[in-house]
Image (cartoon, helix red, strand yellow):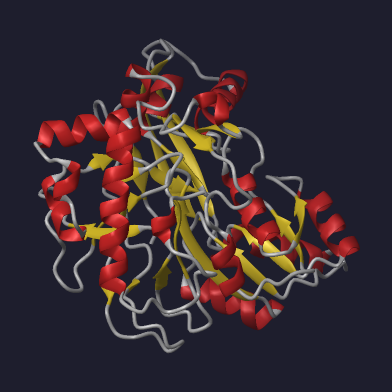
Amino acid sequence: MAVPVTGGGSGHEPPQDWGALQDRLASGAVRHGAAHSREIRRRLARAGVAPREVDGVADLAAIPVLAKDDLPALQAADPPFGGMLAVPVGSLRRIFRSPGPINDPQGDGADFWRVAPAAAAAGFRAGDIVLNTFSYHMTPGGLLLDGGLRAAGCTVIPGGVGNTAAQIEIAHAAGATGYAGTPQFLLTLLERARETGHPLPFRRALVTGAPLPPPLRARLQDDFGVDVYQSYGTADAGTLGYECAARDGWHVAPGVVIELLRPGDDSPSAEGEPGQVVVTSPNEVYPLVRFGTGDLSAWIREPCRCGRPAPRLAGFLGRVGEGVKVRGMFVHPRELAGALGRDPAVAQYQAVVTEDAGGGDVLTVRVEAAPGVVLGEGEVAALRARIREAVKVRAGVEVVGAGTIGEGAGGVVDGRG
């Protein structure tokens, strides 16, 4: 739910004046945030900026960026939302816990995260049956997609994570023609279904939370006949961008301002240069002013073939924060530290993300045993369970020899191509 400054319509109409709309959103977000968010008031006061001085996007430059990686400490100091919530906690519909750890609010409204425009752009229509494979437990991904798909008129199968055979069975029995989830899991379902003689009737998919390399998109289309569309967003800010039928970049979602800023000095990135995606949103429940997602993208200025003239995002071009996204979930070094950092049996550890033959994410945590300690099968199984509990992603554990991992490594290395 957002304040009226976000404008109306379905989110597919070309804005008559993109710059003027963005200016109104920026001004409205600062004024609403200053009136209702302690965090925004504090940041404006530290910068010496009065809300009335912000008339448009250019005026946001005087306000410091709040990094997503700073949210855990901010929320711990001022629970549960770091002073960012603009309504009483008791008025929320749900409270989620995302990896980080980060608490995420859901306010009222049928499509709180504005997913319906992305679903509509992907061709989902009333009466479509869609298998949603994001988690419905603790983290917001499942309900985030669920709300948007239902707002678009779809019937949703809440598949959640894992249990591949059962998901294939129900999608086949129900005649599901749509899919929502990561592109890698879509391929897994299609391949398994074909092997078992129960091919799935998927015709279109809305994918997010993981990269979609061109060969994977082509395979899903050519081998299985599935039209795949990407959506991009965060649990904090909702949907930020999505593809149209042209599949040439991500159209900026309605209701948000996006700046692309150089990491380090937060100045606007040069034309064609990657910059951090920084979001300003006048959401009445959880307003954001210059919220740094940690994601990198670049602007595409040429008008889209679909006819809309507004700039588009050039897709996901990397990360500036510590978190690395694995199978749709962020894995943070601090979570690994919580799971392994104080274990006397572990001398050093490091997580490595790679890809399997099908382009799926593989998370492996390499571990050096402490001197005199032998990590047998039971100990490794316990480490594996503890890591999964901490990062919410299944990981392999590889015990390596002393000195293999550099002193104090403890981080996450992204080895994907």
Residue 128: where, in percent of width, then height? Answer: 77, 68
Give the left or right position of residue 336, taking residue 409 as reference. right
Up-down: is 183 above or below 375?
below
Residue 47 found in image quarter: top left
* Residue positioned 41% across, 71% down in the render: 251
Residue 333: where, in percent of width, then height? Answer: 36, 32
Residue 343: where, in percent of width, then height? Answer: 43, 13
Residue 98: where, in percent of width, then height? Answer: 50, 35
Who is closer to the viewer here, 404 or 233?
Answer: 233
Quadrant placement of the C terminus: bottom left
Up-down: is 327 above or below 46?
below
Up-down: is 264 above or below 230?
above
Give the left or right position of residue 334, taking residue 181 as reference. left
**Residue 278 seen in the figure:** no
Up-down: is 107 above or below 120?
above
Residue 240 found in image quarter: bottom left
Count of all numbered marks drawn on residues in the image: 0
Who is closer to the viewer here, 7 or 335?
Answer: 7
Who is closer to the viewer here, 290 or 325?
Answer: 290
**Residue 95 seen in the figure:** yes
Give the left or right position of residue 217, taking residue 76 as reference. right
* Residue positioned 17% across, 73% down in the render: 271
Residue 121 found in image quarter: bottom right
Who is closer to the viewer here, 396 or 15?
Answer: 15
